[in-house]
Amino acid sequence: MDMTPTDYISLVRVQVACEMLSKTEKSILDIGQAVGFPSLSTFNRNFRKIMGISPVQWKHVPQNYDQKIVNWEIMKGSLTIG
């Protein structure tokens, strides 16, 4: 897969976070902690790396979820959304 285990775990965590953002009214902090990120800044950084926008921005346009997560691809060891 040309992806580190850490990148894969982050991807899965962000996928779950996206679902929680679209289906619950929990705070961004609570969602970040629920999916396993140790701090809000770590959650924001990883979410932005994978999704290209912050969790707050994403929450306002949740229909992007299906397109972006389904179309992700790995290029030279780094995660990009295709």
Image (cartoon, rainbow, N blue to C red):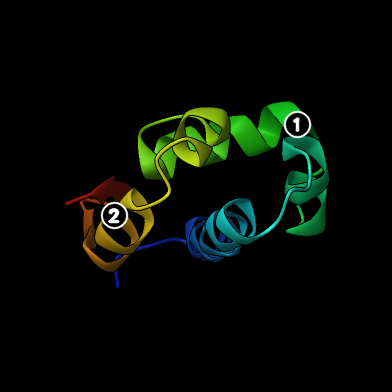
Q: Nearer the viewer, residue 43 or 76?
A: 43
Q: Residue at x 49, y 64 (%)?
A: 8
- Is 8 on the left-hand or right-hand side of 50? right
* Residue 4 horizontal/vertical position (percent): 45, 61
Which label belongs to residue 4?
A: none
Mark number displayed over residue 68: 2
Q: Mark 1 Cα within 10 Å, few/some/many (few <14, many 20+)?
A: some
Q: Label 2 is placed on what type of residue? A: Lys
- Give the tally of numbered discs: 2
Q: Mark 1 or mark 2: which is in front?
A: 2
For the view shown, which residue lies furthest in the bottom direction?
A: 1
Q: Secondary structure at mark 2?
A: helix
SS of the residue at dot 1? helix
Task: Tell me what residue is drawn at x 62 percent, y 61 percent.
Answer: 23
Give the mark, 1 or 2, whose residue is nearer the N terminus. Answer: 1
**Which quadrant of the view contains residue 74?**
bottom left
Q: Position of residue 63 (x, y in %)?
A: 35, 53
- The residue drawn where x is 28% and y is 68% is 70
| Displayed quadrant of residue 10 | bottom right
Q: Which residue is mark 1?
A: 40
Q: Is residue 37 in view?
A: no
Q: CA distance from mark 1 to mark 2?
A: 22 Å
Residue that appears at 32% across and 47% down: 78
